[in-house]
C-alpha cells in the first residue's frame, strides 16, 4: 500500500487580558494523506481526525469508483456498504464511521487502482485505542509508519497481527506475526505498519493500545 503524507503545522498565539500579560498558545497540526487502493481487497486506515467521521463525508460522491464496497468489523461480524455511482451515494446508507485507530476492508472491483485522500487534524497527546479479546481491525491513531514496537503496540504474550498483502492483480493473502512473551519478541518477524494501513489484531484478552504523540 503506497501512501503520501503532507503535514502542515500552524501555531496560533492569542493574547488574553487588556494588559497582554497572559497568553495562551494552541498548536493545530492539519494535513492530508493519500492512500492508494489497488484492485481487489486491501485494509485501509483514516489517521486524521475530523468532525464528521461517516463514510458519506470521508468518501463522498465521486471519490471512489462505482461498486466499491467497504467492510467494518463490529461486534464479531462485518457491516458493509457499497457505493452506487448512479445514485452518487453509499447504500443502504453512508453512516459507517471511520476514525483514527479504526480500519476498514475495502474492495475495489473497478479493475484499476485509485487514490483516496483524507484531510484532517493529527491527534496529539496521549491517545488510547481500546481492543477487545479476540479479533479487532485496528490502526495507529497517528499517520506515522514504523514497526509495531516503535508505534507502541502492546506486547502481549500470544497476540497475533495479520497483515493483508494485496498481490497487485486482485488477489492476496495474510502474513502473520505472533508475540512470544518468553522471548520478548515477535516471530517470525516484527510487523511494520504503513501510513494509511490497518491490520487484524487477535488478542488473548482485552487491551489498550496507548501512545503519547506530540509534534515538536
Image (tube, rainbow, N blue to C red):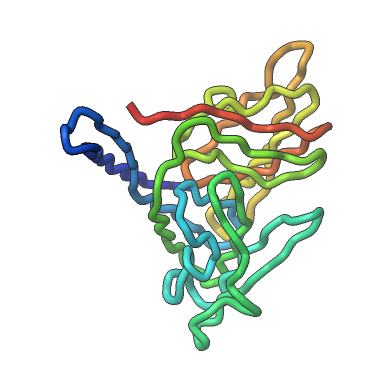
Picture layout, residue 94 above or below residue 7: below
Locate residue 73 relative to residue 66 in the image: left or right.
Answer: right
Front residue of 141/195: it is: 141
Front residue of 36/71: it is: 71
Picture layout, residue 139 above or below residue 216: below
Locate residue 199 relative to residue 35 in the image: left or right.
Answer: right
For the C terminus, the image quarter is top left
Q: Residue at x 62, y 65 (%)?
A: 96
| x, y percent for residue 158 | 80, 26
| Residue farthest along the left direction in this orientation | 19
| x, y percent for residue 188 | 69, 24
| Residue farthest along the bottom direction in this orientation | 86
Picture layout, residue 11 above or below residue 93: above
Locate residue 124 relative to residue 206 in the image: left or right.
Answer: left
In terms of image quadrants, where is residue 189? top right
Front residue of 215/163: it is: 215
| Residue farthest along the top direction in this orientation | 183
| x, y percent for residue 136 | 72, 45
Q: Residue at x 72, y 39 (%)?
A: 131
Q: Residue at x 46, y 71 (%)?
A: 60
Front residue of 26/136: it is: 26
Q: Residue at x 68, y 17 (%)?
A: 185
Q: How many marks?
A: 0
Amino acid at each position: 500500500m503506497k501512501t503520501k503524507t503532507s503535514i502542515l503545522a500552524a501555531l496560533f498565539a492569542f493574547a488574553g487580558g487588556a494588559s497582554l500579560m497572559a497568553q495562551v498558545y494552541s498548536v493545530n497540526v492539519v494535513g492530508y494523506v493519500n492512500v492508494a487502493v489497488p484492485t481487489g481487497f486491501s485494509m485501509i486506515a483514516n489517521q486524521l481526525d475530523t468532525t464528521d467521521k461517516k463514510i458519506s463525508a470521508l468518501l463522498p460522491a465521486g471519490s471512489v469508483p462505482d461498486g466499491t464496497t467497504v467492510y467494518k468489523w463490529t461486534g464479531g461480524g462485518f457491516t458493509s456498504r457499497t457505493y452506487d455511482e448512479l445514485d452518487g451515494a453509499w447504500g443502504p446508507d453512508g453512516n459507517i464511521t471511520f476514525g483514527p485507530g479504526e480500519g476498514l476492508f475495502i474492495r475495489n472491483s473497478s479493475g484499476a487502482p485509485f487514490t483516496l485522500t483524507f484531510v484532517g487534524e493529527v491527534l496529539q497527546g496521549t491517545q488510547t485505542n481500546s481492543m477487545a479479546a479476540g479479533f479487532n481491525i485496528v490502526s495507529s491513531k497517528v499517520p506515522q509508519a514504523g514497526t509495531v514496537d516503535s508505534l507502541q503496540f502492546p506486547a502481549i504474550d500470544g497476540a497475533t497481527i495479520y497483515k493483508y498483502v494485496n498481490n497487485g492483480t486482485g488477489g492476496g493473502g495474510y502474513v502473520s506475526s505472533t508475540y512470544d512473551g518468553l522471548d520478548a519478541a515477535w516471530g517470525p518477524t516484527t510487523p511494520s505498519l504503513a501510513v494509511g494501513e490497518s491490520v487484524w489484531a487477535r488478542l488473548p484478552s482485552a487491551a489498550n493500545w496507548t501512545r503519547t504523540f506530540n509534534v515538536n
